[in-house]
Amino acid sequence: MVLSELLPNRGVPQQSVPDLACGGWRELALLPGVGESQAKEMVRSRAKLGLPLTADRLVLLPGLGPAGVLEVKAWLRECEMRHSKEPASVDPIE
């Protein structure tokens, strides 16, 4: 799935959904409601947290707020649902 299909108004050229656990700030800035400064803070805070960052752990990070956390979680769920509806790619047998 191409991320630009998930975020058509952002024209994102990447091939996957941002990875909360290890994505860089540029990747995290693609999340709804997250800009450059918030994404950089997420990366710094994630390192201090000492746990892999998940959608449920977003509440532990400063600055995103409850509404922002809900928005990101809803967006990630939508991405997962769209991804699960895609047919599995099958390599042709030669």
Image: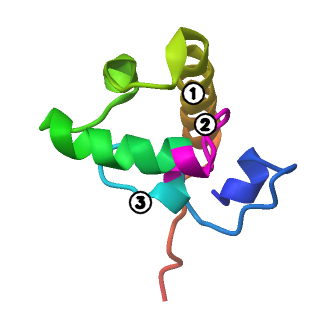
User: What amino acid type should be assigned to the residue bearing mark 2?
Assistant: Cys
As drawn, the label of residue 79 is: 2
Q: Position of residue 59 (x, y in %)?
A: 38, 17
User: What amino acid type should be assigned to the residue bearing mark 3?
Assistant: Gly
Residue drawn 62% across and 49% down?
A: 30
What distance separates the C-alpha of mark 3 from that of mark 1?
Answer: 16 Å
- The reply to whether the magenta stretch includes residue 92 is no
Residue drawn 72% across and 61% down?
A: 12
Horizontally, residue 24 falls left or right of residue 64, namely: left
User: What amino acid type should be assigned to the residue bearing mark 1?
Assistant: Val
Earlier in the chain: of badge 3 and badge 1, it is 3
Answer whether residue 18 is visible to the viewer in this image.
no
Q: Which quarter of the rendering shows the N terminus?
A: bottom right
Relative to 20, residue 71 above or below:
above
Residue drawn 45% across and 51% down?
A: 40
Contact (CB < 8 A) between labels 1 and 2? Answer: no
Q: Position of residue 27 (x, y in %)?
A: 52, 57
Q: Which residues are magenta?
A: 28-37
- In this view, the residue in front, 29 or 80, is 29
| SS type, badge 1 | helix
As drawn, the label of residue 72 is: 1
Q: How busy is the neighbourhood of tag 2: few (under 14 within 10 Å), some, or many (20 plus)?
A: some
The residue pinned by badge 3 equals: 24
Q: Position of residue 48 (x, y in %)?
A: 17, 39
User: Number of numbered discs present?
Assistant: 3
